[in-house]
Image: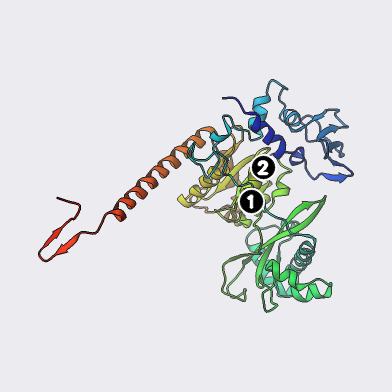
């Protein structure tokens, strides 16, 4: 079946050339970045994208055009207009009538006339919150290298994380001094309380934990927008909470904007797992959970339009189930590239490779044996499984209605008579 015009309009509306650019900077009504087109090793930013009109032009290689479709054709080295359908599929278009599109969680065709996939994107903090995050990130990173926190630094180094990666990723430790630091800089502790960085009594929520900060590119500047923290030893934390604690607000994919700099992205669960992949020289993002939020799925789905995803994780049943659930919920188009890689059973999660001498070799071997997923076939299997599940649920509901609708039997001494019988 042909791709309907409604899908073409949706792609033009939802996909932008900006998503393909690495570290773009705003200059008036344009975004300026290094040329992302193949065959052009751009040393200085020479690519221009007009935000108002949508046209683009590289002043170095001379290629240009109007709209996302012609740009994607040039980006993937395809021919216009011969490869027009392939370009649309790679951008996420679906064939058939709009009412027949399969959005996940997968539904049965005909049950809904409109798509059910939520168009939810995580909300980034405002300027006031970013200012608080910046103070916290700088203070945590500085605390880690103080002599009084040598136990925290020893723990991070003991996990096999190199010092250069510790500094570049702004890994730190919380020592319950954020409230005083905010007051010294004239910032409101109320904002930190709203973000979940301070408790109601004024103490830090992350006190006694190793901190990890997510940085995003906002208006051409790298700013801290989210944080999580981990207990690093017995008695280090001041509470008996969970091993990991997050700030309030929408959860974010860790390392997302940095991942846009590579053509291949490794997807892992934990923040330490991501650090392991980074230490081996690859680009990676962390979901932080085996059940990401809808907003995180939206971010990952947009990343998959232009990057190859490798879902890396534990070889056990729970790990494989989590990766398959992620793929099913992403509902990637058949033209996307996605692979699944399993570590050896004796290793566990990717973070465990940091402390091993053969960790890099094990990682490379697992990556080389990654299995590419046939997304078209996988999508059909998911639909069949969902249909079977919905059929079983409908049968259970019908049986329940029959049981609850039937009147109770009449009990008599020595004999039981069913009033529905003869």
Q: Nearer the viewer, residue 318 or 152?
A: 318
Q: Residues within 10 Å of mark 1 (few under 14, many from 20)?
A: some
The quadrant of the rendering that contains the N terminus is: top right
Image mark count? 2
Asked if residue 280 can be seen in this view, the reply is no
**Image quadrant of residue 137?**
bottom right
Q: Nearer the viewer, residue 400 or 81?
A: 400
Is disc 2 placed on a helix, strand or loop?
A: helix
Image x and y of residue 16, in percent: 74, 38
Q: Which residue is mark 1?
A: 295
Vertical arrangement, residue 89 with respect to residue 410, above or below:
above
Q: Residues within 10 Å of mark 2 (few under 14, many from 20)?
A: some
- The colour scheme used to paint the residues is rainbow
Image x and y of residue 96, in percent: 57, 29
Vertical arrangement, residue 133 with respect to residue 333, above or below:
below
Toward the bottom, the furthest residue is 201
Vertical arrangement, residue 314 with respect to residue 52, above or below:
below
**Image quadrant of residue 215?**
bottom right
Asked if residue 45 can be seen in this view, the reply is yes
Kindly report the distance in space between the C-alpha atoms of the residues bearing marks 1 and 2: 11 Å
**Drawn side of residue 391 relative to residue 111, left or right:** left
Residue at the spot x=62%, y=61% of the render? 159
Q: Which residue is mark 2?
A: 302
Image x and y of residue 268, in percent: 60, 50
Q: Is disc 1 in contact with disc 2, using a CB cutoff of under 8 Å? A: no
Is disc 1 placed on a helix, strand or loop?
A: helix
Q: Nearer the viewer, residue 378 or 116?
A: 116
Residue 189: mark: none
Image x and y of residue 205, in percent: 66, 71
């Amino acid at each position: 079946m042909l791709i309907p015009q409604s899908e073409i309009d949706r792609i033009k509306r939802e996909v932008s050339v900006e998503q393909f650019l690495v570290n773009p900077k705003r200059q008036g009504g344009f975004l300026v970045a290094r040329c992302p087109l193949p065959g052009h090793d751009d040393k200085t930013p020479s690519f221009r994208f007009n935000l108002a009109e949508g046209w683009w032009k590289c002043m170095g290689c001379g290629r240009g055009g109007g709209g996302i479709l012609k740009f994607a054709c040039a980006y993937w080295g395809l021919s216009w207009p011969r490869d027009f359908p392939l370009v649309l599929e790679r951008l996420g278009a679906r064939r058939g009538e709009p009412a027949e599109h399969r959005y996940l969680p997968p539904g049965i065709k005909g049950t809904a006339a409109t798509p059910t996939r939520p168009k939810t994107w995580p909300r980034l903090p405002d300027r006031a919150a970013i200012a608080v995050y910046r103070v916290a990130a700088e203070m945590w990173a500085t605390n880690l290298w103080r002599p009084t926190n040598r136990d925290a630094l020893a723990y991070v180094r003991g996990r096999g994380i190199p010092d250069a990666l510790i500094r570049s990723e702004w890994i730190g430790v919380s020592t319950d001094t954020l409230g005083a630091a905010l007051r010294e800089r004239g910032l409101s502790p109320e904002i930190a309380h709203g973000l979940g960085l301070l408790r109601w009594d004024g103490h830090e929520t992350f006190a006694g934990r190793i901190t990890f900060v997510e940085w995003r590119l906002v208006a051409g500047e790298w700013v801290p927008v989210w944080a999580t923290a981990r207990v690093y030893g017995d008695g280090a934390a001041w509470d008996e909470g969970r091993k990991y604690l997050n700030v309030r607000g929408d959860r974010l994919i860790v390392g997302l904007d940095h991942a846009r700099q590579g053509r291949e992205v490794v997807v892992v669960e934990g923040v330490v797992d991501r650090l392991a992949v980074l230490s081996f020289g690859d680009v990676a993002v962390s979901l932080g959970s085996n059940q990401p939020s809808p907003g995180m799925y939206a971010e990952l789905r947009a990343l998959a339009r232009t990057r190859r995803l490798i879902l890396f994780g534990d070889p056990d049943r729970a790990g494989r189930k989590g990766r398959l659930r992620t793929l099913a919920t992403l509902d990637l188009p058949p033209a996307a590239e996605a692979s699944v890689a399993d570590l050896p059973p004796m290793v566990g999660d990717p973070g465990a490779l940091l402390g091993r001498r053969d960790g890099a070799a094990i990682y490379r071997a697992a990556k080389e044996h990654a299995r590419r997923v046939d997304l078209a076939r996988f999508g059909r299997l998911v639909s069949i499984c969902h249909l079977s599940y919905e059929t079983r649920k409908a049968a259970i509901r019908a049986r329940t209605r029959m049981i609850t609708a039937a009147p109770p039997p009449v009990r008599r001494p020595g004999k039981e008579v069913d009033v529905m019988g003869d």
